[in-house]
Image (cartoon, rainbow, N blue to C red):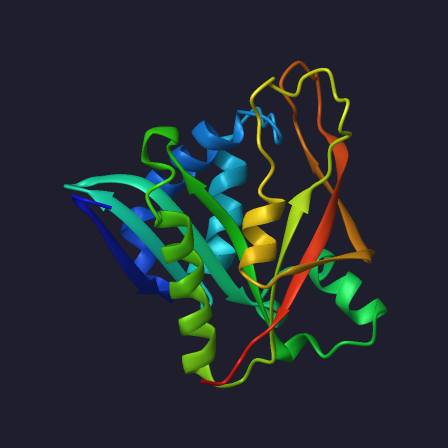
Amino acid sequence: MAGVRIRSLVGAESQKYLSAVAALRIEVFRHYPYLYDGDLAYEANYLRVYAESARSVFVLAQDDDRIVGAATGIPLQDDSAAFQQPFLQRGMDVSKVFYFGESVLLPSYRGQGIGHAFFDAREAHARALGAFAWTAFAAVERSPDDPRRPPLHRDNDAFWHKRGYQPHADMRMQLAWKELGEVQESEKALRFWLRRLETH
């Protein structure tokens, strides 16, 4: 991570960086597997939920003054009902879950440990808050034979397993966004991954 600084910002401290994080999300998620045809208005509304939570965290990777990566986290009870529903259906207390939003990083900065730093910082933040038993995130599901899958594409499953996260087949949600080539938004399936949060 030579030359890259990792910073954690809480709640409203993130306000001045929201436009940079929005642009980064659009750039990174444009590629497989999300294929997101980005919309700044949608991004502003999405990130506003995080910025308005007093217990949220934005973890930024900066190379000089440039934001090259970002990861977010928020108490699940501060997030929208759509993200809470799979947990409620499983009988889980949403007040005990700290939810990780996106983790986006420009390709040239990957493979340097920044992804681990993002998870370390968010888990440490959730642990410091002292109210959470779980950390969780959702990831889009694509068919292994999706024709849009790049030949050298590697899923993050091995990385997430290494971090101690497990996928839950019974915890899924549908989320709509406009995909490249689509005229309008359509729903995509996402699966949740969970890990018990140690108290050390």
Residue 154: % across, % down: 57, 32
Residue 93 in which image quadrant: bottom right
Residue 138: % across, % down: 65, 52
In the displayed structure, 73 sits above or below 159; it is below
Q: Nearer the viewer, residue 78 or 113?
A: 113
In the displayed structure, 147 sits above or below 137; it is above
Residue 143: % across, % down: 78, 30
Quadrant location, the C terminus: bottom left
Q: Can residue 197 be seen in this view?
A: yes
Position of residue 198 in the picture relative to residue 179 (left or right) = left
Point 55% across, 57% down: residue: 162
Q: Nearer the viewer, residue 159 or 68?
A: 159
Point 46% across, 79% down: residue: 127
Point 41% across, 72% down: residue: 125
Residue 174: % across, % down: 77, 44
Point 76% across, 76% down: residue: 92
Position of residue 6 in the picture relative to residue 127 (left or right) = left
